[in-house]
Amino acid sequence: VGEQVLLKCSFKSSSPITESLLVDWTYRPLSGGQMETVFHYQSIPHPTSAGKFKDRISWVGNVAKGDASIIIQNPVLSDNGTFICSVKNPPDV
């Protein structure tokens, strides 16, 4: 709590990295419930514009180096949960 959190995500792809590469970060609260997309990347970062992580997620990844990491600013205990990083680099998934 109070310090930014780095959520690391690394990937390897057998296909060349192109503008078609997609990164989706989803979140499910510890208490369960619906998964929600909190970050999307395709050519440029698209942080969520709604929900509890609005204006608190920054892209620190570098897809050319196989990095899709994000940072969460001002974390609170209620942010606790499961974060999933999904990378698709067509035709490779």
Image (cartoon, rainbow, N blue to C red):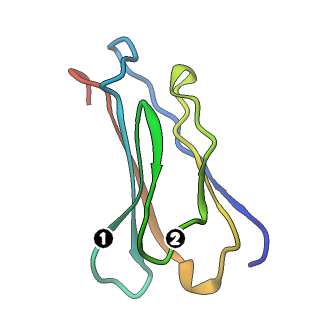
Quarter holding the C terminus is top left
In which quadrant of the rendered view does residue 92 lie? top left
> In the rendered view, does 63 fall on the left or right side of 34?
right
How many numbered discs? 2
User: Mark 1 or mark 2: which is in front?
Assistant: 2
Instruction: Determine which of the numbered discs, if any, sits on residue 45 in the image.
Output: none
Q: Residue at x 68, y 66 (%)?
A: 73
> In the rendered view, does 11 fall on the left or right side of 79?
left
Q: Position of residue 79 (x, y in %)?
A: 55, 78
Task: Identify the residue under disc 2.
Answer: 53
**In front here: 78 or 38?**
38
Quarter holding the N terminus is bottom right
Whether residue 67 is situated above or below residue 45 in the rendered picture:
above
Which residue lies most toward the top here? 16
Q: SS of the residue at dot 1?
A: loop
Q: Position of residue 71 (x, y in %)?
A: 64, 55
Q: Residue at x 34, y 83 (%)?
A: 32
Q: SS of the residue at dot 2?
A: loop
Residue kind at label 1, given as amino acid type: Met
Task: Identify the residue under disc 1.
Answer: 35
How crowded pointer 2 is (Cα within 10 Å; few <14, some 14-19, many 20+) is rated as some
Q: Position of residue 83 (x, y in %)?
A: 45, 62
In which quadrant of the rendered view does residue 39 lie? bottom left
